């Protein structure tokens, strides 16, 4: 694959020793900005692997470059990681750099569409955003009825019996086993 753009950041060189091989390794990452004449430029992080390639390429911030790279993905601890490995970097003169044009459609290429032609799900989403009421609330909303007056209370309860005296409460204590 190939990408063309301006180097906006160069990361420090990382190095280490391979766990299985025991050989030393080095890599350096850099960020390239491409499609920079569009409203929202895009960035990509590319990696140069190997001390000899890092020294040969000698990437510098602010340069305009054409990068040939491979895409590599690997799984680590149930997650996938993707790396863009640069294998050839060619410098471009700033005046010769031609940003890639947007590959999408221009607005004049899209025919006008009326709101009623949109699917119902889209119409609901637009209404929800405009009026703040979800379709579910509209569909299942039931107004709450005004409170009804309470029914008259049942017949009054008879008065409570008077409390027992100490001598009356002791007459049942004698048949307890403890």
Image (tube, rainbow, N blue to C red):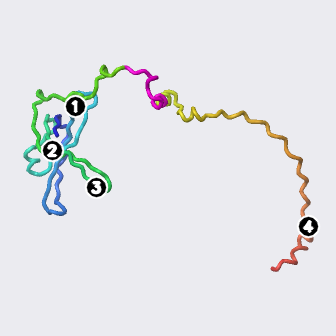
User: Badge 4, how many Cα within 10 Å: few under 14, some, many 20+?
Assistant: few
* Residue for point 22% across, 47% down: 83
Read off the residue under disc 4. Answer: 165
Earlier sequence position, callout 2 versus callout 3:
3
Earlier sequence position, callout 3 versus callout 1:
1
Read off the residue under disc 1. Answer: 35
Which one is closest to the eye, mark 1 or mark 4? 1
* Residue for point 67% across, 34% down: 144
Most common secondary structure along the magenta stretch: helix
Is 90 located above or below residue 105 in the figure?
below
Mark 4 and mark 2 in contact? Answer it, CB < 8 Å: no
> Where residue 66 sits in the image (x, y, percent)?
13, 36
Which one is closest to the eye, mark 3 or mark 1? 3
Instruction: Name the element at disc 1.
Output: loop
Mark 4 and mark 3 in contact? Answer it, CB < 8 Å: no
Whether residue 129 appears in this view of the structure is no
Mark 2 and mark 1 in contact? Answer it, CB < 8 Å: no
Earlier sequence position, callout 1 versus callout 4:
1
Instruction: Quadrant for residue 37, please give it.
Output: top left
- Compared across the picture, whether 109 is left or right of 136 comes to left
Which one is closest to the eye, mark 4 or mark 3? 3
Q: Which sits in the foreground, 48 or 134? A: 134
Marks 4/3: CA–CA distance: 82 Å
Question: Which residue is outermost to the bottom?
Answer: 177
Highlighted magenta segment, given as a residue range = 112-124
Whether residue 46 appears in this view of the structure is yes
Instruction: Quadrant for residue 87, please give it.
Output: top left
Marks 1/4: CA–CA distance: 99 Å
> Where residue 8 sits in the image (x, y, percent)?
20, 37
Read off the residue under disc 3. Answer: 76
């Amino acid at each position: 694959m190939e990408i063309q753009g301006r180097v906006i950041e160069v990361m420090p060189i990382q190095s280490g020793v391979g766990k299985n091989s025991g050989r030393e390794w080095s890599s350096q990452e850099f960020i390239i900005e491409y499609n920079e004449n569009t409203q929202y430029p895009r960035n990509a992080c590319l990696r140069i692997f190997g001390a000899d390639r890092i020294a040969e390429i000698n990437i510098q911030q602010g340069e305009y470059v054409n990068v040939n790279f491979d895409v590599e993905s690997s799984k680590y601890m149930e997650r996938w990681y993707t790396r863009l490995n640069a294998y050839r970097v060619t410098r471009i003169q700033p005046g010769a750099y031609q940003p890639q044009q947007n590959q999408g459609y221009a607005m004049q290429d899209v025919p006008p569409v009326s709101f009623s032609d949109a699917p119902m799900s889209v119409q609901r989403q637009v209404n929800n955003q405009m009026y703040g009421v979800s379709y579910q609330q509209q569909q299942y909303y039931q107004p709450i009825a005004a409170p009804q007056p309470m029914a008259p209370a049942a017949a009054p309860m008879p008065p409570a019996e008077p409390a027992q005296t100490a001598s009356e409460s002791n007459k049942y204590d004698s048949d307890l086993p403890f």
